Amino acid sequence: MADTFDSLEARLPEQRERELMARLPQLVARAKAAAGWSRILKDVNAADISSRAALATLPVTRKSDLHGLQEQQTPFGGLNTTPVGQLARVYMSPGPIFDPEGRGADWWRFARPLYASGARAGGLLQNCFSYHFTPAAFMVEGGASRLGCAVIPAGSGQTEMQVQAIHTLRPDTYVGTPSFLKIIIEKAQEMGVDIGSVKRALVSAEALPESLRTWFAEHGVPHVLQVYASADVGSIAYETWSGNARDAGMVLDEDVILEIVRPGSGEPVPAGEVGEVVLTVFNPDYPLIRFATGDLSAILTDAPSSSCGRTNTRIKGWLGRADQTTKVRGMFVHPSQVHDIVRRHPQIVKARLVVSGQIAQEAMTLHCEVADPASAIANNGGADIVESIRKLTKLRGEVQFVAVGSLPNDGKVIADVRDYQ
């Protein structure tokens, strides 16, 4: 039997898509009321943005752009639709990058991943995310409040006190980074203290290798799930259970529209291909339109149906960073430049710039997927593409033609394979 947080998670996919697209024009119109979005979307008619194809025509705003936007217009670059004084909190991450929190219930949409992890009304959570300047701990607070759970505001550090709190107060759920949970368990063993009340955990902000998940199960915490979240977006996607089995991938939150695009561009890639995560977020205080996270992921196209009842798109989770900018002979080469080269030559289906050799003696080769490599070589050997490489990067580069489907599906547009010895 399905066990979902609410009926939205169990919608038919076509119903979900229809309802998200119906909400999209209102979101764009609301965003355009903010000074920053008004500049970014100045030529956009909100009523026209009612499909994925229309959405894909809008400019991408990158996470890496936020610092510059916020320097121009403090604190949020004019991307907030609610005045600063009417917000609940303002956060500051290194950079600095400022992030808002509005006053709505469960503003970060964290009740869904908490519920998926097994947290329920009347439960007690040990919240080990930092309460200092950054929003992760408050994401948990909002979700727990919506669920009806109590929270121990433990924060990070003070490991012995963490162990004592779990031993005495008997929380059922840990929330925090996976590495800190491991430290707490090891400290409890060292102290000879029972913390066996914690049988499940919701973790984030770090990688969770399967070896560590197995280690947790061997040390009394068999149910450990991840949530993919960020300080600007909140919850993006999260793992789920079907009975005692973990479902494939991570299921998307109900209030985001996901696109996977070619790094360095805003062009969506085919389902299943690795690319950059771009999100449109239905947030009334801080709407985000085609917000490029800088993270790599891919849509799961062959995920088996799960009995958890959630029907939304699933992604593979975090697969690395999309910003593959590298320096060659003193010049920065960006993924966007590779994208611009490809756009100049329609015969290229997909490309990857490989930087090889040794520092100061490196070589650049653009590997190009084309329909007929032999014909491309016979035609002009890629001389026109070589010229585009020189014009756009100010560097010499070679071309190698390969068959369609030959390049790895890992989201890389620039591969640095230089010998740094």
Image: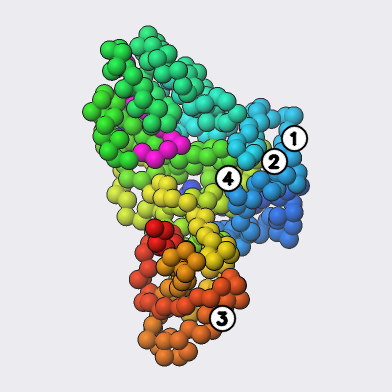
Q: Amino acid at mark 3?
A: Glu
Q: In percent of the image, x 36 and y 22: which residue is there?
A: 184
Residue that badge 2 annotates: 76
Q: Callout 4: helix, strand or loop?
A: strand
Q: How is the image coloured?
A: rainbow
Q: Earlier in the sequence, mark 3 or mark 2?
A: 2
Residue 292: mark in rendering: none
Q: Secondary structure at mark 3?
A: helix
SS class, disc 1: loop
Looking at the image, residue 402 sits to the left or right of residue 157; the answer is left
Q: Is residue 199 magenta?
A: yes
Residue at image mark 4:
281
Q: Which residue is mark 3?
A: 387
Rendering coords of residue 96 (x, y %): 64, 39
Q: Nearer the viewer, mark 2 or mark 1?
A: 2
Q: Are marks 3 and 1 in contact (CB under 8 Å)?
A: no
Quick check: can you spot residue 242? no
Position in image of residue 258 (x %, y %): 50, 51
CA gap, disc 3 and disc 4: 40 Å
Task: Identify which residue, 240 or 306, lies in the foreground.
Answer: 240
Range of magenta residues: 194-208
Distance from the alpha carbon under mark 2 to that under mark 1? 10 Å
Q: Residues within 10 Å of mark 2 (few under 14, many from 20)?
A: many
